[in-house]
Every structure is written in structure tokens, then in C-alpha cells.
Image (spheres, helix red, strand yellow):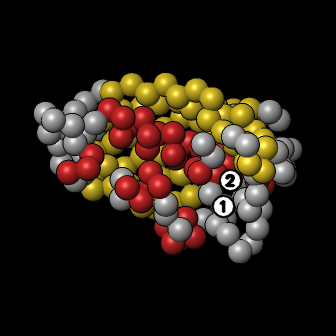
Amino acid sequence: MTPATDTDHSERLNDHLSGYDRAMCLRFVRATADEIVAEYVVDEQHRQPYGIVHGGVHCGVVETVCSTGAGLSAIERGHGGVVGIENHTSFIRATRAGRVRVRATPLTRGRRSQVWEAVVRDENDRLIAQGQVRLLCLEAGADLAGERLAGLNSTDDPPRPGDHA
């Protein structure tokens, strides 16, 4: 197993936000193979009808930070990326406004799967949600949903393990 590096990919990730990450106005603060920190400021697109952040946002952000970290780790170890196969997110406290910060770290990093844990906190450092995501490590060049997994190891493209599925 190759040890993870401290290379911070946050700037590259922020320069190429797409899909869910862009829609949620997510910003990566730190992105290494050992730790992902991301944040967003609560706005209209995050709220459900009662005016609090929708639980699906917490689930999605937990999945994003865990899969990004696992993907960076997998790529450093010669894999093609990762795909999430289980997400368990618990909602602890409701929030309506302010900056939300999410931090993910690995619990296990095996040859074929990884488990990452994420903690979601508000700007007063109160626990909002927490979750674990189990991810399958994919071989370089593997097919995923009918298309060949490509571009993750390219120096031209940012590592986008969060675009896994």
C-alpha cells in the first residue's frame, strides 16, 4: 500500500465544480487523500419547506466529501476511482442559516473497498449531522454505467472522484 500524500487538491476541485457540488455551492477548503474539508453557506436551494436544511443535502454532502477523499486515496494507490455503495447519514440538529462545514476522514482503506466518516458542523461548531460511506475501489479503465472510467489519472483534468455515480 502506498502511503497517502498531503497534496491539497482543493483549488483544482473548486476550479472544476460541476453537478451536485455546483448546485449546492460547495467549496473545498482542504482536499487530500487523508482529509477532505468542504463548506457551504445555507441558501434557498438547501432548505426544505419548513425552512431548515433538507436531510438530502446532508446525505449528498457526506457522500461528496467521503467519495472525494476515497477517490483521491484510490487514485494515489493506482486504482481508477471509487463508487459509493452505502451511505448512512444521521441528522442530529436542524439548521436554517449560516456556514456549514463538513470534514471527512478514512476509517478503513482496503484493496477493494474503503469506509470514510464525515462530520457536519455549523459555524458555532455544533454537530448537525454525521455519516459513513462505504465505497468500492474501481480498477483503472473499468466500465461504469456503460462507459469506460477515464480521465481520473490525467494531469490535465482535476481528480473528480466525486463524479463517480
Q: Residues within 10 Å of mark 2 (few under 14, many from 20)?
A: many
The secondary structure type at the circle numbered 2 is: helix
- On the image, the x and y values in percent for residue 70 come to 66, 44
Give the distance between the C-alpha atoms of the residues marked 1 and 2, in whole angstroms: 7 Å
Q: Residue at x 56, y 42 (%)?
A: 66
Asked whether the viewer can see residue 68, the reply is no
Q: How many marks?
A: 2
Mark 1, residue position: 159
- Mark 1 residue type: Pro
Mark 2, residue position: 72
Quarter residue 59 falls in: top left
- On the image, the x and y values in percent for residue 83 come to 66, 39
- On the image, the x and y values in percent for residue 125 come to 29, 44
Please determine whether, in this image, residue 9 is positioned above or below residue 162.
below
- Mark 2 residue type: Leu
The extreme front residue here reads: 146
Q: Residues within 10 Å of mark 1 (few under 14, many from 20)?
A: many
Q: Residue at x 74, y 72 (%)?
A: 155
Q: Using residue 132 as the reference point, say whether residue 141 is left or right of it.
A: right
- Quarter of the image for the N terminus: give it: top right
Please determine whether, in this image, residue 44 is positioned above or below residue 55.
below
The secondary structure type at the circle numbered 1 is: loop
Viewer-nearest of discs 1 and 2: 1
- On the image, the x and y values in percent for residue 36 come to 54, 51
Quarter residue 27 falls in: bottom left
Name which of mark 1 and mark 2 comes first in the sequence: 2
Q: Residue at x 79, y 44 (%)?
A: 143
Residue in the foreground of this view, choosing between 7 and 10: 10
Q: Using residue 103 as the reference point, say whether residue 124 is left or right of it.
A: left
